[in-house]
């Protein structure tokens, strides 16, 4: 995913802020990912937190565990999985801010408040497709 693709999909100006190689996945510390963090400075959220788009590229040996975790976390938090953007997204309370493409790429919009999540939901399918 490029800054241009992400910016085009969401109508926000994003920049690649950080790339972390072999980063421990917070929900599964034994799983290592390459995490790319994009920030949109003009979209500060509650408490001044930056809006972050996170793209995790998973090692193939960990893909099944990551997808199982994605599914269980989605449903445990009241969400529903559905196909979108060439992949799968988790919809919670009418908002979509995370999904995966295939079994190796997970995309999440982090720190989004309810209004921002609702505003980004219609474009998340394009965001996910650009990661594929």
Image: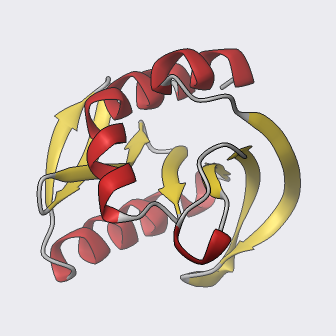
**Looking at the picture, does residue 116 appear above or below residue 84?**
below
**Looking at the picture, does residue 71 appear above or below residue 26?**
above
- Between residue 8 and residue 62, name the one nearer to us: 8
Is 19 on the left or on the right of 124, as rendered? Answer: right
Q: Percent x, y for residue 37?
A: 74, 50
Residue at the spot 48% in from the left edge and 20% down from the top edge? 9
**Looking at the picture, does residue 20 appear above or below residue 74?**
above
Is 120 on the left or on the right of 3, as rendered? Answer: left
- Between residue 80 and residue 48, name the one nearer to us: 48
Q: Percent x, y for residue 38?
A: 72, 44
Displayed quadrant of residue 44:
bottom right
Is 131 on the left or on the right of 83, as rendered? Answer: right
Residue at the spot 65% in from the left edge and 69% down from the top edge? 49
Residue at the spot 45% in from the left edge and 69% down from the top edge? 65
Q: Percent x, y for residue 128?
A: 43, 31
For the N terminus, which image quadrant?
A: top right
- Between residue 70 and residue 111, name the one nearer to us: 111
**Looking at the picture, does residue 111 appear above or below residue 42?**
below
Q: Percent x, y for residue 117?
A: 34, 52
Residue at the spot 60% in from the left edge and 54% down from the top edge? 51
- Asked which colour scheme the image uses, the reply is secondary structure
Q: How many marks?
A: 0
Is 97 on the left or on the right of 79, as rendered? Answer: right
- Between residue 55 and residue 67, name the one nearer to us: 55
């Amino acid at each position: 995913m490029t800054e241009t693709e992400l910016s085009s999909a969401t109508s926000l100006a994003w920049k690649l802020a950080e790339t972390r190689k072999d980063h421990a996945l917070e929900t599964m510390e034994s799983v290592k990912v390459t995490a790319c963090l994009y920030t949109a400075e003009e979209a500060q959220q509650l408490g001044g937190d930056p809006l972050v788009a996170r793209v995790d590229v998973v090692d193939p040996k960990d893909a099944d565990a990551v997808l199982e975790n994605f599914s269980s976390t989605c449903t445990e938090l009241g969400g529903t999985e559905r196909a979108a953007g060439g992949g799968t997204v988790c919809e919670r309370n009418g908002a979509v801010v995370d999904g995966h493409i295939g079994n190796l790429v997970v995309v999440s919009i982090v720190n989004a408040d309810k209004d921002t999540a609702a505003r980004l939901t219609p474009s998340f399918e394009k965001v996910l497709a650009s990661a594929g």
